[in-house]
Image (cartoon, rainbow, N blue to C red):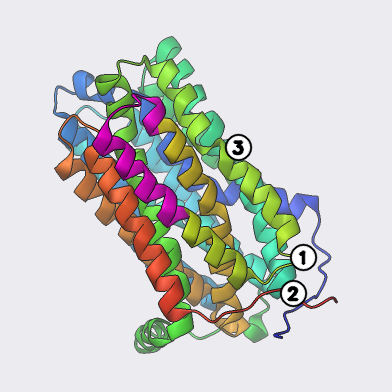
Amino acid sequence: MSTVSSEKSDVGVKFILILGLLSAFGPMSIDLYLPALPFITDALQTTDANTQFSLTAYFAGFTISQMVYGTLSDSWGRRPVLLFGIGLFSIASILCALTSSIEQLIALRFIQALGAGAGVVVARAVVRDHVKGTEAARIFSIITLVMQIAPMLAPIFGSLILELAGWRMNFWILFLFGILCLVTVIFGLPESLPHTERSPLNVKDLLKGYVSVLRNKTCLGYTIASSAAFGGMFAHITLSSFIYQDVFGLTSLQFSYVFSLTIAGMSITALANTMLVQRFHYTAILRTGTIAAASTGVLFLIVIIYDGFGIIGVILPLCLYMASLPVIAISSVTGLLDSVEARRAGLASSVFATVQTGFAGLISAIAAFLYNDTVLPLALLVAGTGLIALISEAALLPRKGVNPTP
């Protein structure tokens, strides 16, 4: 029976809340403006496909940013990288609010994402600076639970802003969120990587580091399993506002309620994971999560093909699919960071985030291309990504069961 770290940390509530806030950059930047997508199409006199491409551009920028931020934080420290990324995000948010064309919005969303990636990547590395193993999994679970507030409330908040002040106000809110995070990092998050543990920045070594992580079967297994599962979620994010509002005729506020309901189960499983990691090894939890993702994805496809349940046939399977994602993400990132030495935590986090976000962007683009005013493209992508997650977990990762008693 394998042992895992039972190391206890001295990190407190403030630490977890700050990292949860930084990890919320992605959900806040995406979910807040989802209800406004059809309105942006009309306001900027463009097509649904072009508006959806602004989301794809965000994924592309997010992917590129995560390729470098982890390694930069390994060399320069966590705080400088965070401050730069958050500052860039805040400036781009203002420019998004002032845009006058869809081309400008697409370009600015790309730049906004270049800044947003710092929060997610560096937050993971900061956790690894303090703890690993079971304790890291527990903290990642709590951080995930904290950050779930954003995707649950952001669409509702975005719809209310849309009704009261128009779609541009959403980007002013993102600017204020960026300023809040900037102040929080400056005054509340000390540097966690000592100078003695930093790695010199070298492009050749960087490329070698990427290759070494991706050639590691275990690291690759964790990365692909999480990336594939989250690909289904981003297919849902890309198409949901059009499916619920155009196909089923919901208002923007009704859509926000349904979207929030769809992902509400993620908070429940994130909370449950804080207890499960005390009893079961994270690899066993990951296996259960990928089985759940694959089975509910296939169920969703079958329901849509038979088309006998209306909107309930969309909401219920997606609720179940989304509920599997936190345990997959938490277990995967814990396993990945456990597989590398501390001075490579930022690099490993970058690889993980880059592949995950890159795959999400690819699935988002495919979803926008396949969308035909029906739910079938979404069902196909959710089922396919769930199965990829299960296959990669089964083929590449070790089998472990119950955690030993500390």
> Whole-percent x and y of residue 365?
22, 49
The answer to which image quadrant residue 32 occupies is top left
401 over 209 or under it: above or below: above
Magenta stretch encompasses residue 240: no
Q: Which of 282 and 95 is in front in this view?
A: 282
Q: Nearer the viewer, residue 245 or 50?
A: 245
Residue 47 seen anywhere in this rendered image of the structure: yes
Q: How far apart are marks 2 and 1 (CA)?
A: 7 Å
The answer to which image quadrant residue 389 occupies is bottom left
Q: Nearer the viewer, mark 3 or mark 1?
A: 1
Disc 3 and disc 1 in contact, CB within 8 angstroms: no
Residue that protrudes farthest toward the top in the picture: 164
Secondary structure that dominates the magenta span: helix
83 over 27 or under it: above or below: below
Q: Which residue is drawn at 21% across and 24% down?
A: 41
Q: Which of marks 2 and 3 is nearer the N terminus?
A: 3
Q: Distance between the residues labelled 2 and 3?
A: 30 Å
Amino acid type, label 3: Ile
241 over 217 or under it: above or below: above
Disc 2 and disc 3 in contact, CB within 8 angstroms: no
The secondary structure type at the circle numbered 2 is loop
Q: Which residue is drawn at 57% across and 44% down?
A: 266
The magenta segment: 293-314
Look at mark 2 in the image and give the residue it sits on.
403
Amino acid type, label 1: Gln
Pointer 2 local density, CA inside 10 Å: few below 14, some 14–19, many at least 20? many
The secondary structure type at the circle numbered 1 is loop
Amino acid type, label 2: Asn
Q: Earlier in the sequence, mark 3 or mark 1?
A: 3
Residue 189 seen anywhere in this rendered image of the structure: no
Look at mark 1 in the image and give the residue it sits on.
278
